[in-house]
């Protein structure tokens, strides 16, 4: 079946430092799945952060960006300068097949220290 | 305001009791989902509902059943809860088309003792 592996948390960085959360995927039912990053802030549901449905493209939102690399089957999340408000749990996910079913990674808890 | 609402937010039940988790959405989305999340694991799909009375098992349906009698409402039922069903449960909805974005609820934290 499909699977997603991402950086094991927690990840702690200082404000204004750069961030990278690694994500690699394996999709058995489709060559090029759609890829997503979701974020869950404390006390809230998951929110879509960004998505990319075309291999080779880059998605960006709120200063975060991720590039769909089909050669390395990766979709790493990066930000040049994090803020304390970025503290949350980040989930990499993919959709493959016809039922719009999301397969998630385990999530990476990010703590940004002032 | 488009949202998915889950009730209750927190729940404590004794082993063997029945549990009802409720989920509502105000977007008229056809498709709804129940996921659970445990430490170190991604969200795991329990059930999908494609519309009223049209439900399919997800990856981990054992010990759960669902009910969808209205498009805007999707319930997850645990008959005789077990301690290994302690988890955080998330409900979500989406339009039926491919690549559609999900809207998630805030989750229900269930503790079975």
Image (cartoon, coloured by chain):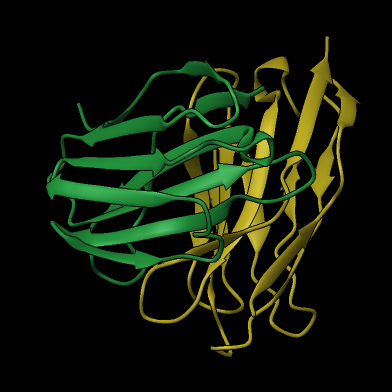
**Vertical arrangement, residue A50 with respect to residue B21, above or below:** below
Side of B56 relative to A46 (left or right): left
In the rendered picture, chain A carries what hue? Answer: yellow
**Vertical arrangement, residue A60 with respect to residue B84, above or below:** below
Side of B4 relative to A7 (left or right): left
Q: In which quarter of the view is residue A114 placed? A: top right
Q: Position of residue B84 (x, y in %)?
A: 69, 40
The residue shown at (75%, 70%) is: A74
The residue shown at (23%, 33%) is: B24
Q: Position of residue A35 (x, y in %)?
A: 56, 65
Q: Which residue is at the front of the view, A30 or B92?
A: B92
Report how many numbered discs are placed on residues in the image: 0
Q: Where is residue A7 in the image (x, y as percent from the top left)?
A: 85, 50
Q: Which residue is at the front of the view, B33 or A22?
A: B33
**Vertical arrangement, residue A24 with respect to residue A91, above or below:** below
Side of B54 relative to A51 (left or right): left
Looking at this rendering, what residue extends furthest in the top direction?
A114
The residue shown at (48%, 28%) is: B17
In the rendered picture, chain B carries what hue? Answer: green
The residue shown at (56%, 66%) is: A94
| Quadrant in the picture for the C terminus of chain B | top right
Q: Where is residue A56 in the image (x, y as percent from the top left)?
A: 61, 77
| Quadrant in the picture for the N terminus of chain B | top left
Q: In which quarter of the view is residue B4 placed? A: top left
Side of A59 relative to B64 (left or right): right
């Amino acid at each position: 079946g499909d699977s997603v592996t991402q950086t094991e948390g927690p990840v702690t960085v200082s404000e204004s430092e750069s961030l990278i959360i690694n994500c690699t995927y394996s999709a058995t039912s489709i060559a090029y799945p759609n890829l997503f990053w979701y974020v869950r802030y404390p006390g809230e549901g998951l929110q879509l952060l960004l998505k990319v449905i075309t291999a080779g493209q880059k998605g960006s939102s709120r200063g975060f960006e991720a590039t769909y690399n089909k050669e390395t089957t990766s979709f790493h999340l990066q930000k040049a300068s994090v803020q304390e408000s970025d503290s949350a749990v980040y989930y990499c996910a993919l959709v493959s097949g016809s039922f719009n079913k999301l397969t998630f990674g385990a999530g990476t808890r990010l703590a940004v220290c002032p | 305001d488009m949202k998915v609402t889950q009730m209750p937010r927190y729940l404590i039940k004794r082993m063997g009791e029945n549990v009802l988790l409720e989920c509502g959405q105000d977007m008229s989305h056809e498709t709804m989902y129940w996921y659970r999340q445990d430490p170190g694991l991604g969200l795991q799909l329990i059930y999908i509902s494609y519309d009223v009375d049209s439900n399919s098992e997800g990856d981990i349906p054992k010990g759960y059943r669902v009910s969808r009698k209205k498009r805007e409402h999707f319930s997850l039922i645990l008959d005789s809860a077990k301690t290994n069903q302690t988890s955080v449960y998330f409900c979500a909805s989406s339009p039926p088309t491919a690549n559609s974005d999900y809207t998630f609820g805030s989750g229900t934290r269930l503790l079975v003792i």
